Amino acid sequence: MTLANPAQPAEAPKPASKTPKSSGVKVITIRVADFRSLTNIEVVLNDLTVLVGANNAGKTSLLDAAQFAIGANRRLLGKEDIRLANDEADVPKGRRAIVDILLRPVDDDGKIVETFPEGSFWTGLWGPGIAQDDDQDDMVGMRSVLEWSDVYGDYRTTRKFLKEWKPFAEWHDAEVGDIVSAAQIEAIALHYIDAKRDLEDDLRTRGSFWRRLTEDLGLSEDEVLKLEEALSDINKTLVEKSKVLQHLRENLMELKKVIAFEKAGVDIAPVPRHLRDLSRGVDVSLNSGGTSAFPLTRHGMGTRSLASLLVFRAYALWRREKAEDGGDEAHTLLALEEPEAHLHPHAQKALFAQIRDIPGQRIVSTHSPYFVAQSRLEDLRLLIKTKSDTTVSQLDVTKLTPDERRKLEREVLASRGDLLFSRALILFEGETEEQALPIFAESYWGATAHEKGFSFVGCGGANYYPFVWLANSFGINWYVLCDGEERTITRANAQLKKIGLSTIDKLDNVSVIGGKTNYEGHLIASGYMDAIEEAFTVALGAGSFDQYIADLDGKPGKKIDGKETTRNYNSAGGRERAAGDLLDERKTRLSTPVATAIAALADERRRVPPAIRKLFDKISADLKED
């Protein structure tokens, strides 16, 4: 079999022409308690739910919890899957891991409805397991529990229907009913594809999606018989014409001297005799634009990983179609870990459409800003781990205007999707700070901003709103270095007011530059002329600053409040005024050399300007940084 190159967006497989109708059911919510790092969380699921967060935030634990509850291939769990607190040497035997799943009936368009249709597939499957909530709407709740059993002397799993769906604050106490059987889970079973997926392995692995899909090729009995006769003829011809195969058979005939069979014999079949065995030895080849086709084993992990995902999509579409044809229902629920693994940026962008076209519901954990950039705001779930506990946040987009939503999607997610993976956002107004602050951060912490997990974001015109709204909604730590000019403070206050926050003078995570000046003015007022002039020499050449003063003294300066000004560099403070003008006029060229010169000063306390040090001190205190 030969595939087109899936790494090229232009040649990516097209979406299926037929969109399957809704399965009639949807998983609405998952609740998890005391499962690994997940102490007590609730996650609302959409058709596509995108889990983001730093490494070890709990994304994989959440996928494993869902797999534990309703996975198609549930593995045995034990003590290591029960939450262990930081101050505990061992897991208390009385502690149990709980995972609750809530399902609701939906119509053909996937909209939640009040009741399951009478006589439907789902009512037949779950029967008395269908309960009613406080509004008398139909629901199906399933509780999976992992706990110690004194009877068996080991950890055991039970799965039961819930008779009620309580508010989150009381959910542990919900009343349970009958046991949930494996058959009652099968039609909604979650399929988990982890980051180690590889089509080359799937081709050889029993129970893989490839093997499930190819077990029945859909041929009639007569067609199977004819094709298997042809396979037998091919085997016979190969053995008759191959001296190597004949030599092997003759030597293997020595088996009869050891095995006491009266009529022992050996037959070699280079090609499988039965069609059902063909998928075990199948080889998939791929050509990339006119070159010879190469087996998948000779392609990179990115191609093999993506091919494995596309096979699952084929399996899900085929399974759904066969269920519809047979008058049954099948709800496809996919948990997918890091689909972007091993793919280059353009392929990561193209990948989103492939996942979007998989029928049913998809829960995707990702570290890819390209994937996040294409996601809907309401589909994002941010996981943050504080100490040993994980929290999950989602965005309430109901209060956003269309324009505010566009700004968030265009100005934040589309270009800065990496912000969702940050430990802290540090916001400022200009491009000067964008170059300088990472240098000061490395001087202050002894590590780069990337190593610390901090994102520095320039918000031209004090346009803090989309970044602060997103960070505030998701519970990401955010900080602002604000210029002290009155118009900047006025704009900043207006931006924060839209979010319902106090003015900047009342927020301790905002550091305002004093003296009603900007960043450049702050450096000069803080006594950094020595480092600034050294940077001028490095960046512009020896004597360049003196020449600048000589050339421009007495010439027109920039307008202030619409009024003309004249440069005065020879009176008291003239050299400082000249430095301020030069820094303002050549921001991008001088920002890095000036920050580098300051960070290299002999006096350690002077290596970070006061307003910036104040901000970094606050960040260190909040994040417990050394």
Image (tube, helix red, strand yellow):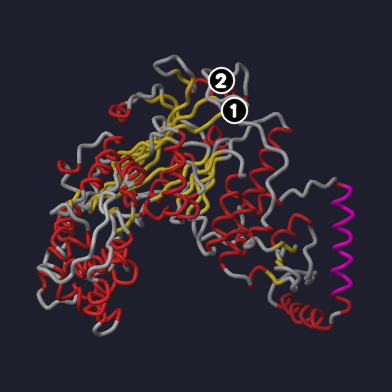
Q: Are circles 2 and 1 on residues that touch, CB within 8 Å?
A: yes
Q: Position of residue 50 (x, y in %)?
A: 46, 45
Query: Does the image show residue 154?
Result: no
Farthest residue, direction top: 136
Q: Nearer the viewer, residue 603 or 54?
A: 603
**Crowding at mark 1 (Cα within 10 Å: few <14, some 14-19, many 20+):** many
- The residue indicated by pointer 2 is 116
Q: Nearer the viewer, residue 594 or 13?
A: 594
Query: Does the image show residue 481?
Result: yes
What amino acid is found at the position of numbered circle 2 in the picture? Phe
- In the image, residue 293 sits, relative to residue 37, either above or below, namely below
Residue ID at (9%, 75%)? 603
**SS assignment at label 1:** loop
Q: What is the magenta range?
A: 222-238
Position of 318 compared to 140: left or right?
A: right
- The residue indicated by pointer 1 is 24
Q: Position of residue 103 (x, y in %)?
A: 48, 29
Position of 22 compared to 266: left or right?
A: left
- In the image, residue 35 sits, relative to residue 309, either above or below, namely above
Instruction: Identify the image quadrant of residue 382.
Output: top left
Task: Report the magenta stretch's main SS.
Answer: helix
Q: Is residue 236 magenta?
A: yes
Q: Position of residue 69 (x, y in %)?
A: 44, 40
Residue ID at (30%, 40%)? 495
